[in-house]
Amino acid sequence: MQRILTLVLFVCGFASAAFLDIDIKDSRLQTENSVYKPGGILGFAAEFGVFNEPENMVDYTLAVGVSRFGYSHSDGDVSVSAWDIYIKPFVWSVTIKRIMFETYVGFGYVFSMNNFNPALFDDMEEGSALHHGDFKYGYRLGYRITDQLQVSLAANYQVLTCDWHANPGGGDTMLTGGWGINFQWNIPWIPF
């Protein structure tokens, strides 16, 4: 484990560029559901990434972060939310004249859940369980205001998997996500 952490620190420390990224977004159920008056909640994500080279037309980056997502129901009286830590190992972008389009896939681990249906956790006789792993995907369209600052319109989605139909969609997956605004600051990186 120490060797892996040392390798990660070495790679991140000598990466040609790094960035900090913040997302503020609307998060809501995207799958067909039986929720009473569904709505959205304020989603949030913060991440750190490496290998970002904004001067390249086609660029690959790697990012890790933490995010909040979920949905609300009953006219917004109850919010259902989760927090996860994630890695985006496949982030590709194309930049033409300061306009950037990016797409990604990633994987997360849900470490905190609030107000989810208890049947997703408690009814083990029925074989129900909400997996703590989630799959992420999304894209964003942005403009590089300066060499350090970029503002984007982003769409982020999380797919949670259940072993039983107790989730609001009635199937074995629950898709949440939505549109938001993204701010990225490219760090003038000096290897340590």
Image: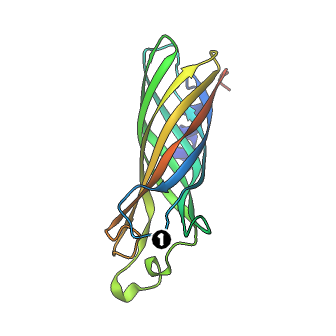
Q: Is residue 44 left or right of residue 106?
A: right
Residue depicted at 48% across the width and 53% down the height:
108
Q: In the displayed structure, does residue 32 sit left or right of residue 8?
A: left
Residue drawn at point x = 56 percent, y = 34 percent = 49
Task: Please tell me in which quadrant of the rendered image residue 124 appears.
Answer: bottom left
Please state the horizontal and vertical placement of residue 150, each as a whole percent of the image.
Answer: 60, 24
Q: Which residue is mark 1?
A: 36
Q: Amino acid at mark 1?
A: Tyr
Extreme residue in the left direction: 171
Q: Determine the image quadrant of residue 163.
A: bottom left
Residue 117 location (% of width, % of height) = 49, 76
* Horizontal and vertical percent position of residue 140: 47, 32
**Residue at horizontal 55 percent and vertical 29 percent from the top:** 152
Residue 91 at least partly seen: no
Secondary element at tag 1: loop
Tell me where residue 35 appears, x and y as whole percent: 45, 69
Which residue ends up furthest to the top in the rendered image?
97
Quadrant including the C terminus: top right
What's the residue at 53%, 59% (across, down)? 39
Q: In this orientation, does residue 139 appear?
A: yes
Where 177 falls versus 60 (above or below)? below
Q: Residues within 10 Å of mark 1 (few under 14, many from 20)?
A: few
Q: Nearer the viewer, residue 14 or 74?
A: 74
Q: Is residue 78 above or below residue 47?
A: below
- How is the rendered protein coloured? rainbow
Numbered-mark total: 1
Query: Is 37 drawn above or below residue 188 in the view shown?
Result: below
Q: Residue at the far bottom: name it.
A: 125
